[in-house]
Amino acid sequence: MAQDILKIESILKDKYLPALKNQIGTEPSPFLEKVKKVPLTNNEIVASAPIGLNGGFGFGYEGTNVPDPNAQQYQVFKEKAKDMYVSIKISDKTIKLASSDASSMLNALNQEVQGSYVTAKWNLARALFGDGTGKLATVTANAVASNEVTVSDTSKLREGLTIDFYETTDTTSDTPDIAKRRITAVDHVNNKITIDGSATAVKAGFITVQNSHGREITGLGAIMDSAITTIYGLTKADNAWINPLTKDVNHDFTDIAISELVRDSRDYKGGNIDMLLCGDKAYAQYLAYMKENNTVNSDKLQFKGGVVGMNVLLGDHNVTVVNERNVPTAEAWGVDTTCFELHATEWDWATKDGGIFTLISGTSYYNALLACYGNLICKNPGSCIKFTNCDAAA
């Protein structure tokens, strides 16, 4: 039996791990593919952000004092590394049945590994555009115990996801009101989900992925959402320069509207917007605008995750426009990807005495844990731009 476990561990290390590292690091989103990757060396991530212009310039004439040497101002951003995990479980029975055939061993592993990869990819893509709180949706209280739950939005919910329920006023130090329930069905039309386990009278509040309340990476949502009042250790209200530029296009999402904010980011915030991430309705509206105005765009950009972006000339800027499902559906977010860095360790198996698998106490299942530690940080969050009401008029 020990030899069978060693075979599986060897397959996971040598066959699957290199591919998983590459795929999880690039495929979740075109945004992630373009972001600079920096090896994590400390639990606290620090970035120095320049503020405005160097203060040492001034005009004068011969014989007068030269300008005072007022150096460039900087602000220090700090962010904690977050823990990201993917658990893989395989039964003792599966191992024994597949032990005599190498191909059967691979088949037994492949389904579990691929399922775990898809889950990790989906959750990382979602978190990249989240605000760090981990909140997936708000919940309407059930007056009568039921397995059906009404939620505010199902866009971040999928069958199979294991979730925790919190009450509205709960903070990150509170324990879930209901923990580790698995979603068995999602009704995207009526904003309802079905959960496993016994029928429950859930309270008004919100849901997160299991164990994840307040523990997710600091995604773009933390920059774009004005309801998030602090970022990187700074209060937004006291540091207006870190707030993104916003524009309500009032259902008129055109190149002119986009170009204006792209230009303002350059002129006022030192940004060079190179990617516009459009929610589903915003993207559909932009395509309709291009078709209506007979705009022909043959310059396409294929990303590793399968997404195709359009390279569009907006004023004097070339911007890649992509459909990003994790951006609110009627919004579009513009970013200078050169300002972002993902500080992270490589994805790797958590080991004990060199081994990957541990037997889960009281069960016949073995568990392997794929782990990564890190966070996303932006050196110039104020250069970001945000468009609202980008969908078609009602």
Image: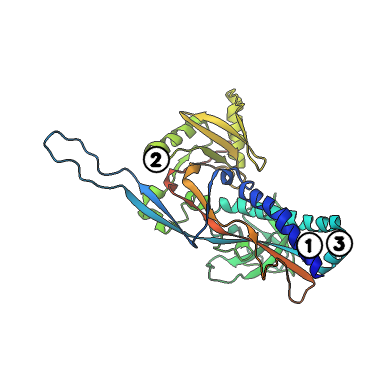
Q: Which comes before the other along the chain, label 3 or label 2?
A: 3
Where does residue 337 sit, x and y in percent of width and height? Answer: 50, 43
Which residue type does callout 3 highlight? Answer: Ala
> In the displayed structure, would residue 37 be above or below residue 1?
above
Dot 1, how many residues are within 10 Å of its Cα: few (below 14), some (14-19), or many (20+)?
some
In this orientation, which residue lies closer to the viewer: 138 or 314?
A: 314
Q: Earlier in the sequence, mark 1 or mark 2?
A: 1
Q: CA distance from mark 3 to mark 1?
A: 11 Å
- Label 2 is placed on what type of residue? Gly
Q: Residue at x 70, y 58 (%)?
A: 13
Give the SS element for disc 3: helix
Q: Is residue 261 above or below residue 244?
A: above
User: Which residue sits at x=73%, y=72%?
Assistant: 360
Between marks 3 and 2 in the image, the one whose residue lies nearer the viewer: 3
Q: Residue at x 50, y 59 (%)?
A: 41
Location of residue 178 with respect to 101 vertically, above or below: below
Task: Give the residue pinned by disc 3.
Answer: 98
Q: Quadrant of the N terminus?
A: bottom right
| Residue underneath mark 2 | 270
